[in-house]
Image (cartoon, rainbow, N blue to C red):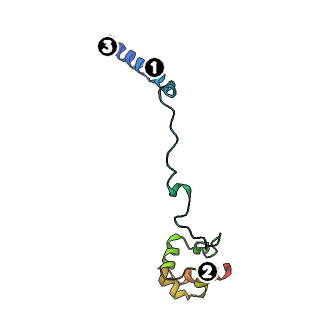
């Protein structure tokens, strides 16, 4: 190995040693973190966006409780005026299929599940 290569390797070793020393002493060099002044945003706390004191503690009319209905289908059904399990159980398969943009056989299954859940 030539002399220049040895000096490069030596410099890399010194830099790595300094970096390791800084890493080991970082807690002594940095100030203690300050506690946050503000409360975290609502999306992190899970707090509701509105205060609905008349709402029941549990939501038995959550349409996503029906097998096969996710948030997107529930949103489509709510926009069409089907907001409760009773509404869903009383609707026709054709109306539910049109509102949710799905097949009538899937809608019929949802109607049967909603009737069983209510």
Please state, as top left, top right, bottom left or bottom right, where the C terminus lies in the image.
bottom right
Q: Secondary structure at mark 2?
A: helix
Tag count in the figure? 3
Residue 55: which disc? Answer: none
At a point 65% along the width and 70% down the height, the residue shown is: 58
In this view, the mark in front (3 or 1)? 1
In the rendered view, does 25 fall on the left or right side of 54? left
Residue 33 placement (x, y as % from top left): 50, 36
Distance from the alpha carbon under mark 3 to that under mark 1: 20 Å
Q: Which residue is mark 3?
A: 4
Residue 79 placement (x, y as % from top left): 47, 79
Distance from the alpha carbon under mark 3 to that under mark 2: 80 Å
In the rendered view, does 2 fall on the left or right side of 26? left
Q: Secondary structure at mark 3?
A: helix
Q: Quadrant of residue 105?
A: bottom right
Residue 80 placement (x, y as % from top left): 48, 82
Q: Secondary structure at mark 1?
A: helix
At a point 50% along the width and 74% down the height, the residue shown is: 75
Q: Earlier in the sequence, mark 2 or mark 1?
A: 1
In the rendered view, does 68 fall on the left or right side of 72? right
Q: Which residue is mark 1?
A: 17
Q: Which residue is mark 2?
A: 85
Q: Earlier in the sequence, mark 3 or mark 2?
A: 3
Q: Earlier in the sequence, mark 3 or mark 1?
A: 3
At a point 34% along the width and 15% down the height, the residue shown is: 5
In this view, the mark in front (3 or 2)? 2
Seen in the picture, residue 90 relative to 5 is either above or below; the reply is below
> Is the C-beta separation of discs 2 and 1 under 8 Å?
no
Q: Quadrant of residue 86?
A: bottom right
User: Toward the viewer: 6 or 32?
Assistant: 32
Question: Is disc 1 surrounded by few (<14), some (14 to 19) or many (20+) residues within 10 Å?
Answer: few
């Amino acid at each position: 190995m030539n002399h220049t290569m040895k000096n490069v390797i030596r410099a890399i070793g010194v830099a790595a040693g300094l970096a390791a020393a800084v890493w080991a002493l970082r807690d002594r060099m940095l100030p203690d973190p300050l506690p946050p002044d503000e409360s975290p945003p609502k999306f992190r706390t899970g707090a509701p966006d509105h205060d609905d004191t008349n709402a029941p503690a549990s939501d038995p009319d959550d349409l996503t409780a029906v097998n096969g209905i996710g948030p997107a289908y529930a949103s489509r059904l709510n926009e069409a005026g089907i907001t409760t399990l009773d509404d869903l159980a009383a609707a026709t398969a054709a109306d539910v299929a049109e509102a949710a943009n799905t097949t009538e056989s899937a809608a019929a299954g949802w109607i049967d599940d909603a009737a069983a859940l209510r």
